[in-house]
Amino acid sequence: MNWQFSLSGPGEEPRIVSAADPAQAELFRAAMRRFATTVSILTCVSEGSRFGMSATAVTSLSTEPPALLVCVNAATATHRALSRGGAFCVNVLRSCHAELSRAFSGQVRGEERFASGAWQQTREGLPFLADAQANLFCESERTMSYATHTVFLARVLSAIVRQHVDPLIYQNGMYAIAQPIGLHRTPP
């Protein structure tokens, strides 16, 4: 199947390119930036060290049993730690956590990432963000590699959910906030 992508602004004719065109990768990335996604920080412990990274490719997989699907770039140190198996935590960020997310997106390396934020740990030593919207404590059950990423299928063993809903959103290459809209809002 030959995929075709188009990118255009208001009043412009769509520009169509085929999958063979080098521009298709950029157009695909542009299309994916249109997804508004909640930002989380994945954390785990491996061989006595803490690992963590910001993630936007996290979604519910099942409610019975409770499970998540988490996609992680194979080039990251956190991927290597997660691949060893064991528990990890999905820390669902609040809008006030944009700087913390940046630190866990590569601006800060290794253990230094945990110098900022309200980090606590479980009895087993698993780090979790105490002021996150929610903490989902997981165990990886299956993995599937695809191109540059690994998909982790994880069972949720327990969760902490805080009352206030205030997600940090990532959309179009930048952080954003979510606001409720009225039922009678007309599109622009």
Image (cartoon, helix red, strand yellow):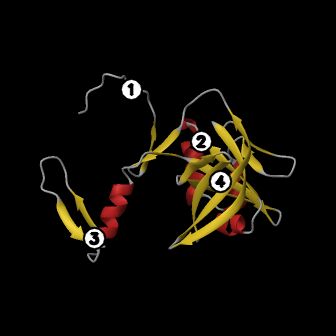
Query: Alpha-carbon neighbours of circle 1 within 10 Å: few (<14), some, or many (≥20)?
Result: few
List the residue tagged with mark 4: 42
Q: Work out whether residue 76 can be spotted.
A: no
Q: Which amino acid, mark 1?
A: Ile
List the residue tagged with mark 1: 181
Q: State which tag comes first along the sequence, 1 or 3.
A: 3
Q: Name the element at disc 1.
A: loop
List the residue tagged with mark 2: 93
List the residue tagged with mark 3: 23
**Gap in Å between the C-alphas at discs 2 and 1?**
21 Å
Q: State which tag comes first along the sequence, 4 or 1.
A: 4
Q: Position of residue 15 (x, y in %)?
A: 17, 62
Left or right, 22 with respect to 148, comes to: left
Q: Name the element at disc 3.
A: helix
Dot 4 and dot 1 residues touching (CB under 8 Å)? no
Q: Which amino acid, mark 3?
A: Ala
Mark toward the viewer: 2 or 1: 1
Against 60, residue 150 (above or below) is below
**Residue 99 location, quadrant:** top right
Front residue of 109/49: it is 49
User: Which corner quadrant holds the N terminus?
Assistant: bottom left
Front residue of 61/162: it is 61
Instruction: Report the residue at 69% width, 47% height from top.
Output: 65
Mark toward the viewer: 4 or 1: 1
Q: Which amino acid, mark 4?
A: Leu
Instruction: Report the residue at 36% width, 50% height from top.
Output: 34
**Gap in Å between the C-alphas at discs 4 and 1?**
30 Å
Mark toward the viewer: 1 or 3: 1
Q: Position of residue 21 (x, y in %)?
A: 26, 75
Instruction: Report the residue at 53% width, 54% height from top.
Output: 57
**Gap in Å between the C-alphas at discs 1 and 3?**
35 Å
